[in-house]
Image (cartoon, helix red, strand yellow):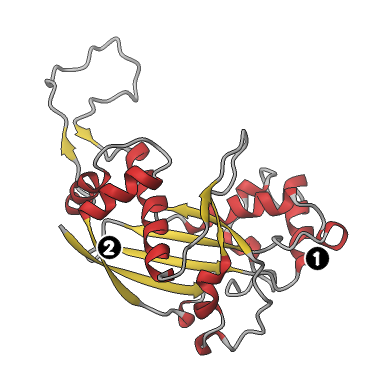
Amino acid sequence: MNYDFDITFRIGKDNSTKDVQKINITDKTINMFGSLYGESQILDLGNHFNLYHLKGKKKWRLRGGSTPLSPHIPSGILLNLEKKPGTSVSGNFGEVLTILILKKLFLPKKLTICHLKSKKKCPDLMLDSSVFDTYYSSSKTLKYSLPSLPDILLGECKNTNFPEALTQLATIWYEMGDPSVYKNPLFGFGVISNLYYKTNPPKIRFSIISPVNRTALYKKLNDAEKGIGITPPGIKNMKINDFKGGLLYGIK
């Protein structure tokens, strides 16, 4: 099957800066890139994409009988009559399609990109930031006085879940330490790709994240980790509203 993906670029969550284009991708290409760049070993990822996209929000019927529940089963346990998309499969869509699309956009140059792993949670990817230069510095974003991007960006891929992806990046920023002391050039920067594979056409939204005030951003993360102004404590529990107030461009 052929898909005309809608590709959107924005600064933070600012939809007024979007730059939409279409890229045609086939299920065979998804199969090939899934084999090359999928973090998990899943055969025929493109065939899974066809099925999950076409099925959308509907569920498959789970065939296996409909015996009434025993009265001895604790309350709250119900018969499961539906299958759900495998998260171990759909979780690979975002990473594979992110790499595929960015490589296409970067042609004829060679895009440097790699997977990351850690005993703790960490971003999915590390990649060459120059692939975003055109969109980051385009006329549609000049209402911001944007800082220059570092040479590399940490990337987080999530199917539709922007807030969780942002807290994933923020956790790593906090580990980099106080930017006024350690001066890590990656602090406050990153890119989030959100895949909407159930829509027609399917969409990928790239959100370029950059800091307005690094000192204030670090203080907010430090407070969150200590439970100051947030319950329960922890950066992972921060909401989008916690990042507002002049911390990140496009989130206000």
Residue 158 in the image, given as x and y percentages of width and height: 44, 52
Identify the residue under disc 2. 202
Gap between marks 2 and 1 measured at Cα: 38 Å
* Residue, far right: 181
Under circle 1, the secondary element is: helix
> Does residue 40 lie above or below 69 as drawn?
below
> Does residue 29 lie above or below 19 as drawn?
above
How many marks are shown on the rendered structure? Answer: 2
**The disc label shown at residue 215, or none:** 1
Pick the quarter of the image with the C terminus.
bottom right
Name the residue at 80% across, 52% down: 177
Under circle 2, the secondary element is: loop
Pick the quarter of the image with the N terminus.
bottom left
| In the foreground, 54 or 33 | 33
| In the foreground, 203 or 45 | 45
Residue 12 visible in the picture: no
Left of 121 or right of it: where is 75?
left
- The amino acid beneath tag 2 is Pro
Classed neighbour count for the residue bearing mark 2: other residues with Cα under 10 Å, few (<14), some (14–19), many (≥20): some
Name the residue at 19% across, 50% down: 50
- The amino acid beneath tag 1 is Thr
Classed neighbour count for the residue bearing mark 1: other residues with Cα under 10 Å, few (<14), some (14–19), many (≥20): few
Name the residue at 36% across, 70% down: 7
Nearer the N terminus, badge 2 or badge 1?
2
> Does residue 27 lie above or below 20 as drawn?
above
Left of 238 or right of it: where is 198?
left
Residue 214 in the image, given as x and y percentages of width and height: 76, 66
Residue 41 visible in the picture: yes
**The disc label shown at residue 138, or none:** none
Name the residue at 69% across, 61% down: 186
